Image (spheres, rainbow, N blue to C red):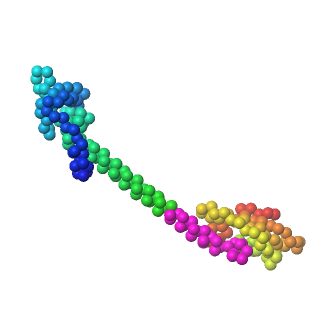
Amino acid sequence: MSYWKDQLRGSFKQPGVGQNIEVILTSGVVHRGILKELTDKSVTLQIEQGTLTFDRMNIRQDSRLKIFIEDYITRYASDYVKSEKEAYRARILERQQKEQQEREVVEKAQRKEKIEKLFSAWDGSLYSLVHYIKKSMNDPKSFDHIETRYSDNGTDLTVYMKFRGKNAFGALVINSVMAKVDYEGNVISILATDP
C-alpha cells in the first residue's frame, strides 16, 4: 500500500491558499469560498466578510478527496491494492483451472489405457463378459465372438457384444448383449439381450 501511496502523492493537485474551493459537509450543506488555511485536520474558508473553519471529519468523503492529500492517497491506493489482489486471485484461479484440466487429461488417458486392457487384443472381446455369457449358454464351446463396442459413461462402461452360439436345438444363431461393466471389468448388470 505504501508503494501506491508514494506513487499517488505526485498526482494529487492540492488546492492552494487563495483558490476558490467547495466544501461539502456530512450534513449535505455546501460552502464555497476562498481557501485561507489548510491543515491535516481542518480547512478554513473566507466566505463573504467572515471565515469558517471546518473539521476534516465533518466534511463528506468525496469532498475530502479533493482537499486532503491523505484522504486522496489512502482511498486510491486501497483501490490499486484491491485491483492487484483481484488480479492475483484471477491468476491463481486460472492456474488452478489449468492444472485441473491437465489432471483430467492425464486421468482420462490413464482410464482409457486401463479400460483397453480389459479387452482382448486379439478379437476385441471383453473377457469378463465372454465368461459371463458362456455360463448361461446351452453350448459354451460353440461361442464365437463377432464384435464388441463400448462407451465410457464416466463411472462405468456400457458394452455391446455380438456373438454366435448354438441354441437348444443345436442351430448356430447370432445373439447380442448389452451390459453395464465397472472399470475392473466386472459385469454389474445385463441391460439388454437379443434374442
- Residue 51 position in % (x across, y down): 11, 26
Q: Is residue 170 left or right of residue 103?
A: right
Q: In this view, does 41 lie to the left or right of 74?
A: left
Q: Which residue is drawn at 67% across and 69% down?
A: 187
Between residue 183 and residue 103, name the one nearer to us. 103
Q: Which residue lies furthest to the top in this view?
A: 49
Between residue 101 and residue 69, name the one nearer to us. 69
Q: Which residue is drawn at 15% across and 27% down?
A: 34
Indicate whether 19 appears above or below 95: above
Q: In this view, does 171 lie to the left or right of 62?
A: right
The answer to whether residue 9 is visible is yes
Bounds of the magenta segment: 102-126
Between residue 22 and residue 10, name the one nearer to us. 10
Between residue 191 and residue 101, name the one nearer to us. 101
Is 124 a magenta residue? yes
Indicate whether 52 appears above or below 80: above
Q: Quadrant of residue 132?
A: bottom right
- Residue 69 position in % (x across, y down): 20, 41
Quarter of the C terminus within the rendering: bottom right
Is 52 a magenta residue? no
Dominant SS in magenta: helix
- Residue 103 position in % (x across, y down): 50, 65
Indicate whether 126 appears above or below 73: below
- Residue 165 position in % (x across, y down): 82, 72
Q: In which quarter of the image is residue 144?
A: bottom right
